[in-house]
Image (tube, rainbow, N blue to C red):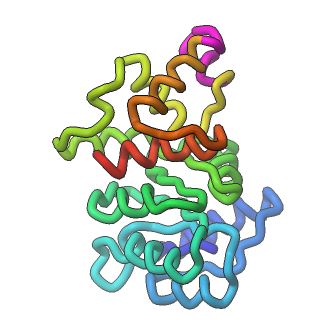
Amino acid sequence: MIAEDSVLLRVGVTRLLADEDIETVAAVENGDELLLAVSEHRPDLAIVDVRMPPSFTDEGLRAALRAREELPGLPVLVLSQYVEERYAVELLAGGAGGVGYLLKERVADVAEFVDAVRRVAAGGTCIDQEVIAQLMARGRRNPIDLLTPREREVLGLMAQGLSNVAIARSLTVSDGAVEKHVGNIFSKLGLEPSSEEHRRVRAVLTFLDRG
């Protein structure tokens, strides 16, 4: 389902996803309608804008958080022009369920957007590096201070959902080097051993939660 106050974006994203055989069960324009649609349709993914009627501040994120209370584990992909710090961290660190945060003006490739939609719907994560940078800039000490510059690069690429092989290719290093960096990140963020995918998601979300 899609929650977006711009009718052109609602229709555009709906048609884009339809071309990829992804059905939109509801397309709404405010937080109240989002909650009703989630209750009625129990979607596999909610794509949500941050600022919607009536005040155009943070209605979308607040509604997404309430929707997750009603439907635990609901995957949420925020698609917005803004980084709303107060509720973004709460959503991104909210536990089980896929989560993503993309900035509209930085979505330049349809295939990458569709990949992000599928990844978050499947329980993964996809967070724009600019979102991470803005949340980091809040000025409070966080575990990122413990990471080396290379580990920070790796964490940023992990936030985009890249595999170890893809990270190695991006940084022009060996797969083994990336595995070592990822292990160090898990250790420095205090993440206990569990499934690899779970720890990759928590590596990003724990950092944002403590940011």
Query: Does 71 lie within the magenta span?
Result: no
Residue at the front extreme, as displayed = 192
Frontmost residue, 187 versus 200: 187
| Image point (56%, 41%), residue name | 199
Query: Does 168 lie within the magenta span?
Result: yes
The picture quadrant where one finds residue 75 is: bottom right
Q: Where does the image place residue 22, in percent across and percent down from the top left? A: 77, 64
Q: Where does the image place residue 133, in percent across and percent down from the top left? A: 32, 39
Q: Where does the image place residue 25, in percent across and percent down from the top left? A: 71, 79
Q: Is residue 87 above or below residue 120?
A: below
Frontmost residue, 178 versus 13: 178
Give the quadrant of the N terminus: bottom right
| Image point (44%, 51%), residue name | 103
The picture quadrant where one finds residue 158 is: top right
Q: Is residue 37 above or below residue 175?
A: below
Give the quadrant of the C terminus: top left
Q: Is residue 107 above or below residue 19?
A: above
| Image point (56%, 90%), residue name | 36
> Left or right: where does residue 19 sit relative to residue 73?
right
| Image point (33%, 65%), residue name | 87
Residue at the top extreme, as displayed = 173
> Left or right: where does residue 143 sit relative to residue 46?
left
Residue at the left extreme, as displayed = 139
Number of callouts in the render? 0
Q: Where does the image place residue 72, in percent across and percent down from the top left? A: 57, 74
Which residues are drawn in magenta? 166-176
Q: Main secondary structure of the magenta part?
A: helix
